[in-house]
Amino acid sequence: MRLLISFAALFLSVVLLQLGSGGVAPLDAISGAALGFTTAEIGMLGSAHFVGFFIGCWWAPRLMGTVGHSRAFAAFTAAGTIGILAHMMVVDPWAWGLMRVASGVCIAGCYTIIEAWLQAKVTNATRGRAMGIYRIVDIGGNLAAQLLIGVLEPAAYVSYNLLALCCCAAIFPLTLSRVEAPETPDAPRLRPRLAWERSPLAAAGVVVSGITGAAFRMVGPVYGLEVGLRPDQIALFLAAYVLGGALAQFPAGWVADKYDRRMVIIGLSAGGIIACATTILLAGSGTVAVFLAAGLFGVMTMPLYSVSTAHAHDFATTTERVELSAALMFLYAVGAIASPIVTSLLIWGFGPAAMFLMIALACLLLILFGITRMRARPAPADRTAYTYEPRTSFLIGRLLRRGRDR
């Protein structure tokens, strides 16, 4: 209980950030559809978010070093709030793209600061409990953000204003906390080749994870509308995906620690293909069937990132952990930046099923590559502990490093 109280301000800020900036993506998708944006333009908004996300990951450590944790957090939150509020002032897809860059910068920057704060305050004795609570709060806030969209009217000033208020309110818990801010962490170097050098399969796995996750989160609302869901049902559709992925994390971790992680990656990829086929087949079978298919898709695809990163860290030394996490996040961002725009173009040209055909193809290529890598070298004798990574900032590598090295 004392641990929960000591980090209550940070965790409350996480929830408010999820409700605010985290809720913009699905609201933008259904609002864009209501305003007559093309599918490609809606996909561009998702790609713009991840461009901002990448910028925020690297800008945050430098800004913290200049003005400190609290002021940097306030600056990033203000950027996200401005980006949300401006939506109904300028109704144009390209202008919204710039606003989504601001939202991506906000989420990445704020999470980098929160995770740096946690990293500096936890000890080996409290690390596991702190991370457990952090994961629950992160997933809970994500679920709440998806469900909130169900009660918001698309393309309405009040809807965006409510999200902006939640984002702005995230400033209060952290900046008014009486807990002393930690020292500024050093920024990790970006060495994308490090991920490939340590594990080509893990590098490919996180790219595929970026493709699948970004496609569903950013363009999934468009798919839902195309297959007959009402705008107020999109929230439950996305929540089913998040809930399925959350429930799968710990079983996937147990299997990944017990068996060859390469087989687990291949198995998850095969499951992803099955989930894609199931989703396509059930598209016309009613609302409940579509929700169940979304949950199955989350079960099969969301653990892929954590299993892939665990496999990469099996081949890394203690001093490489942070830079390896940064490299893996960079590769995830590469897949996530390209995926929404490509997915939206496919849906526009070939229909809603094209999204899952593209994801199934990515999973198939990962299976073939995994089989090739299994023939290249044996599995490592000593393996790091599986850790669920919420993919929020590069600094998560520091926060989880000691847990892997125990």
Image (cartoon, rainbow, N blue to C red):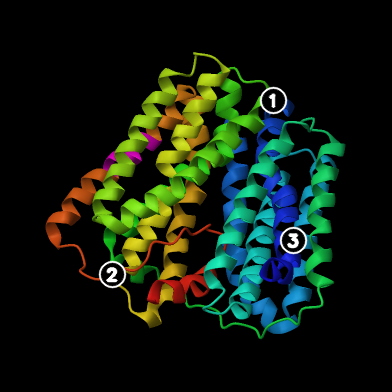
Q: Are marks 1 and 3 in contact (CB under 8 Å)?
A: no
Residue at the image position 70 percent from the left and 58 percent from the top? 14
Question: Which residue is situated farthest in the front direction here?
Answer: 1
**Which secondary structure class fits the magenta region best?**
helix
State the image coordinates of residue 306 (x, y, percent, origin top left).
42, 56
Looking at the picture, does residue 8 appear above or below residue 166? Answer: below
Q: CA distance from mark 3 to mark 2?
A: 37 Å
Per the image, the residue denoted by label 2 is 197
Q: Residues within 10 Å of mark 2 (few under 14, many from 20)?
A: few
- Answer above or below: position of 392 versus 338: below
Kind of residue at badge 1: Pro
- Farthest top residue in view: 285
Q: Residue sitting at 82 percent across and 38 percent down?
A: 159
Q: Nearer the viewer, mark 3 or mark 2?
A: 3
Number of the front mark, 2 or 1: 1
What is the secondary structure assignment of the residue under circle 2? helix
Which residues, given as a range, are shown in magenta? 359-365
Q: Nearer the viewer, residue 77 or 91?
A: 77
Earlier residue among tags 3 and 2? 3
Secondary structure of the residue carrying tag 1 is helix
In percent of width and height, residue 177 lies at: 81, 73
Q: Is residue 96 left or right of residue 220?
A: right
Given the image, on which type of amino acid does mark 3 rest? Ser
Q: Which residue is mark 3?
A: 13
Q: Which residue is at 49% across, 59% downward?
A: 389
Precedes in sequence: disc 2 or disc 1: 2
Where is residue 212? Give x, y as percent.
Answer: 45, 42
Q: Which numbered disc covers residue 231?
A: 1
Q: Looking at the picture, tell me which residue is in the foreground, 120 or 195.
A: 120
With 269 as the anchor, is 380 left or right in this view? Answer: left
In contact (CB < 8 Å): disc 2 and disc 1: no
Q: Is residue 283 in the magenta section?
A: no
